[in-house]
Image (cartoon, coloured by chain):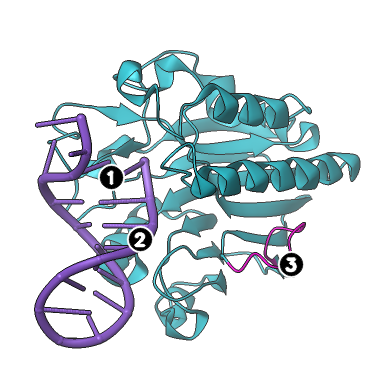
Chain colours: A cyan, B purple
Amino acid sequence: MKIATFNINGIKARIEALTAWLDDAAPDVALLQEIKSVDEAFPREIFEDRGYNVETHGQKGFNGVAILSKYPLEDVTRGLPGDDADEQARWIEATVVGDVALRLCGLYLPNGNPAPGPKYDYKLAWMERLHARATALLASEEAALMAGDYNVIPQPEDAARPEAWAEDALFLPQTRAAFRRIVNLGFTEAFRARDAAPGHYSFWDYQRQAWDRNDGIRIDHVLLTPQAADLLNDAWIEKDVRGREKPSDHVPVWVDLAA
DNA sequence: ATGCCTCCCCGAGGGAGA
């Protein structure tokens, strides 16, 4: 089963690039972030016509996550538990059943800038809720993954210019520690399990010719429970998508599971 | 580099992103 996570930066602006990518790359499952659409406005027919089941958790203007799947999506839940007052659409879960059942969690972790400040407080609180959900997911002993835009640069080698991010919410020690604390519960970070080399990125800013200068950061991640990690065939970043027509500023990050 | 683009809201210019 080939699964990709992709921050598309707006479904309306990305519909042509996204459908071209789907037709070419043919993921079994695509976890999408930043759909920037309410559920009613999401063009689900375009994907259903291509054989995908569609589940969305959108909101007006920004944020929003979705799952496209060639397998039926079961037991769908929306919203990260732990704060009933949180109205931001950043989390969706569903189960797919291939050779084995696999729980999918799609996430769009808050950016958190400027730090310090209320937005950074929200990011850290959200990561604490993620830690709680991750703990429960491990306790279930299911094959499961949490994939999406984490807005976390885990290590200096995940940025072309780490010094430029020293004061940024994506790279502050407290951010990286919160991420490590989740991974260290027992998850496998799929890409790093396959490739330990520096210089692999999943985001390049639209500004300052960041793509042309390869001034990127790696912030889109797939975390696997042990039961899912046992199924890992491969993981990779589809870098060339960034150089296509009217691209998102992120590119797809993939795993291939024996599931 | 106090965001130089891009996308969203709408229908001008501001919020958000990273």
Query: Which mark, by number, is residue A171?
Result: none
Asked if one can make out residue A143 in the rendered structure from this viewpoint, the answer is: no
Other-residue count near label 1 (Cα within 10 Å), few / some / many at <14 / 14–19 / ≥20:
some
Q: Which residue bears the numbered disc 1? A: A241
Please tell me in which quadrant of the rendered image residue A255 appears: top right
Q: Are marks 2 and 1 in contact (CB under 8 Å)?
A: no
Q: Residue at left 46%, top 40%? A: A253
> CA–CA distance between discs 1 and 3?
37 Å
**In the shown orientation, is residue A76 left or right of residue A29?**
right
Local SS, label 2: helix
Query: Which mark, by number, is residue A84?
Result: 3
> CA–CA distance between discs 3 and 2?
38 Å
Magenta segment main secondary structure? loop
Q: Quadrant of the C terminus of chain A?
A: top right
Which comes sooner in the sequence, label 2 or label 1?
2
Asked if one can make out residue A170 in the rendered structure from this viewpoint, the answer is: yes
Say which amino acid is labelled 1. Val
Say which amino acid is labelled 2. Asp
Other-residue count near label 3 (Cα within 10 Å), few / some / many at <14 / 14–19 / ≥20:
few
Magenta span: A78-87
Say which amino acid is labelled 3. Asp
Q: Residue at left 76%, top 59%? A: A81
Q: Position of residue A202 (x, y in %)?
A: 38, 36
Magenta segment includes A171: no
Chain label for disc 3: A
Q: Position of residue A166 (x, y in %)?
A: 39, 21
Query: Which mark, by number, is residue A23?
Result: 2
> CA–CA distance between discs 2 and 1?
13 Å
**Viewer-nearest of discs 1 and 3:** 3
Q: Residue at left 19%, top 35%? A: A211
Number of numbered discs visible in the structure rendering:
3
Are discs 2 and 1 located on one and the same chain? yes
